[in-house]
Image (cartoon, rainbow, N blue to C red):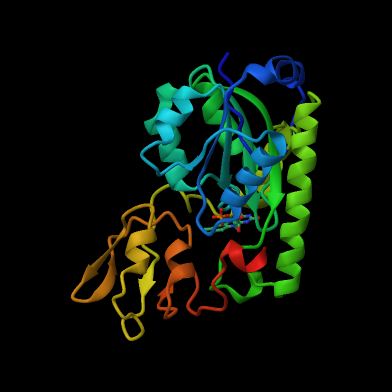
Amino acid sequence: MPFLFLICCTGPAIAGPLLRKGWDNMKIAGIYFSGTGNTKYCVETFLRAFRESGPCCPLESPDAVQTISDHDVIVFGYPVYYSSLPTIVRDFIYQNAGVFHGKKVFLIATMGLFSGDGTGCAAKPLKKLGSDILGGLHVRMPDCIGDEKVLKKPLDQNRRIVREAAEKLREAAGRCRSGKPPQKGLGFLSYVAGLFGQRLWFFGKTKTYSDKVKIHADRCIGCGVCVKVCPMENLDLVGGKAATKNRCTLCYRCFSVCPKQAVTILGKTVYEQCRLEKYT
Ligand SMILES: Cc1cc2nc3c(=O)[nH]c(=O)nc-3n(C[C@H](O)[C@H](O)[C@H](O)COP(=O)(O)O)c2cc1C
């Protein structure tokens, strides 16, 4: 029986008996989108705590669709942007609508602070496409926006946040094993919190891809590292400098890896390049 397991946070425990009953025979895989490594870490940590085997791959990988197709339970993880799905995640779901039909999904949504219905954002379209949502988990992680000073925290605090996240993920895996998967973000109240807490004020921010990436030509050395890591193929080298094609999903990967701090996105100054490895 196909099972898709998505990672985010909130909701009713309807799937427990199903999970417990057939778990040993189910094929489980992790699929995630992760700009700076937070969500990758969360999905991998959850899967390790839950069970040892099963592939785990990024949704931009050529294997992602086949991996979903070949497995029963999918643990689906993504970061929350403005209490919404990143554009690349929303597009992935709709462009591969058929593969989700009949799958069981557990959602993991990562966030810097608050998302309301982070998991609900994917649960809604997936349910429409015929997935069975087993549950969801919201995980607080370091905020990946490194060019807004107000969002930056001391290193110690980010390290503590990651330790607490790992603990929460292990606990959630235990709850799933005992047939009571967490249901965070899936209920009506969470939806209201996401809508009024963020989506209304940031309306349309993730509706289309963004033109906000700025390459500071005076600092860019044309090394091409940003070009290689971009999941949208949004960057190219033109005349020895990085140039953008205005199809950015706002993941902050290019920003985080640039050796010369030559990229900014939402802010104007690089305060901290946030990559998960710094905090583990
Ligand atoms: C464009 C953008 C919008 C974000 N919006 C939110 C938000 O609404 N609430 C929140 O708590 N965190 C928000 N974050 C923080 C990320 O969700 C968080 O850092 C996440 O763990 C990053 O995961 P990743 O490293 O896997 O990409 C936002 C980050 C970005 C880049």
Position of 170 with respect to 30 (left or right) is right
Could you say where residue 179 lies in the image, as x and y percent from the top left? 78, 23
Q: Nearer the viewer, residue 151 or 259?
A: 259
**From what the image shows, is residue 23 above or below residue 88?**
above
**Left or right, residue 190 beside residue 273:** right
The image shows residue 70, relative to residue 59, as above or below, that is: above
Q: Give ligand 1's quarter of the image.
A: bottom right
- For image coordinates 29% across by 71% down, the residue present is 242
Rendered location of residue 273, percent (x, y): 54, 72
Compared across the picture, whether 247 is left or right of 142 comes to left
Q: Quadrant of residue 245?
A: bottom left
Query: Which residue reaches farthest left?
Result: 239
Q: Based on the displayed image, in which of its 4 quarters is residue 180 positioned?
A: top right
**Residue at point 50% right, 73% down?**
267
Question: Up-down: is 67 above or below 26?
Answer: below
Instruction: From the viewer's side, name the closer residue of 54 and 42.
Output: 54
